[in-house]
């Protein structure tokens, strides 16, 4: 009996879920064809229909990570500094799900840095995030809630701050629990608002 398009799409969803479970458990360091096949209960031969080489699997996993991150629910926020704060809180590992997602993101850095094409794609993702933050910063400046200066520089600084805080929280969760992360972010934003 020939396979239908629905069968193929269902299998692709199954493969995606298996890739995600391997990432959640082992990060990118443990992402292998064998690990995904075992998680799927299939052979590595089946996976070669989807990913002819390991690099294809890694590229797919990076795209899957970006897609899932983009689809995560976001905090509702008004305009100005409240929107900036909400966007930055959405990055931090404040929930169990956000911890898992951030662990996968951080584990992806090594893999992406080792491959110029993957590195460029990751760079574009972070650039898009900075662009969104830049627009939020500009809106907060228009409302008089942030000091003058380049919104692009403010966005780059804020992204750097929260990514550093992500790393601290992942490695030292007892020293950087959610409430401490939030306090640090609020202090950072308050300092931006009070600069001359």
Image (tube, rainbow, N blue to C red):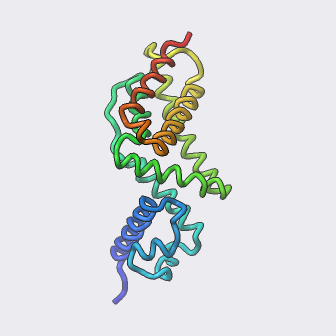
Residue at left 59%, top 22%?
A: 150
Residue furthest to the left in view is: 76
Answer left or right for 74 relative to 23: left
On the picture, is 62 further left or further right than 143? right
Where, by quadrant of the figure, is residue 94 drawn? top left
In the rendered image, which quarter is residue 39 located in?
bottom left
Q: Which residue corresponds to the image point at 41% horizontal and 51% vertical from the top-left?
A: 100
Above-or-below relation of 46 to 145: below
Quadrant containing the C terminus in the rendered view: top right
- Tell me the quadrant of the picture where the N terminus can be found: bottom left
Residue occupying the point 44% across, 16% down: 145
Expressed as whole percent of the image width and height from the top left, the position of residue 85 reads: 41, 28
From this view, report whether residue 73 is shown above or below residue 1.
above
Residue 3 in the image: state x and y as whole percent. Answer: 37, 82
Residue depicted at 50% across the width and 18% down the height: 191
Instruction: Spot the residue most to the bottom.
Output: 1
Q: Is residue 125 above or below residue 77?
A: below
């Amino acid at each position: 009996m020939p396979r239908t398009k629905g069968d193929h799409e269902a299998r692709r969803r199954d493969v995606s879920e298996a890739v995600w479970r391997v990432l959640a458990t082992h990060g990118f360091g443990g992402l292998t064809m064998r690990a995904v096949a075992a998680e799927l209960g299939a052979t590595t031969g089946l996976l070669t229909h989807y990913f002819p080489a390991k690099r294809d699997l890694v590229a797919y996993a990076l795209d899957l990570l970006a897609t899932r991150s983009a689809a995560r629910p976001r905090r509702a926020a008004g305009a100005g500094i409240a929107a900036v704060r909400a966007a930055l809180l959405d990055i931090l590992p404040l929930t169990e799900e956000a911890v898992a997602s951030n662990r996968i993101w951080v584990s992806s850095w090594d893999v992406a840095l080792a491959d110029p094409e993957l590195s460029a794609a990751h760079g574009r993702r972070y650039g898009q995030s900075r662009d969104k933050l830049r627009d939020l910063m500009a809106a907060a400046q228009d409302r008089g809630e942030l000091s003058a200066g380049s919104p692009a520089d403010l966005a780059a600084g804020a992204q750097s701050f929260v990514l550093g805080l992500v790393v601290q929280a992942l490695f030292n969760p007892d020293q950087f629990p959610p409430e401490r992360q939030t306090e640090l972010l609020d202090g950072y934003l308050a300092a931006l608002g009070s600069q001359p």
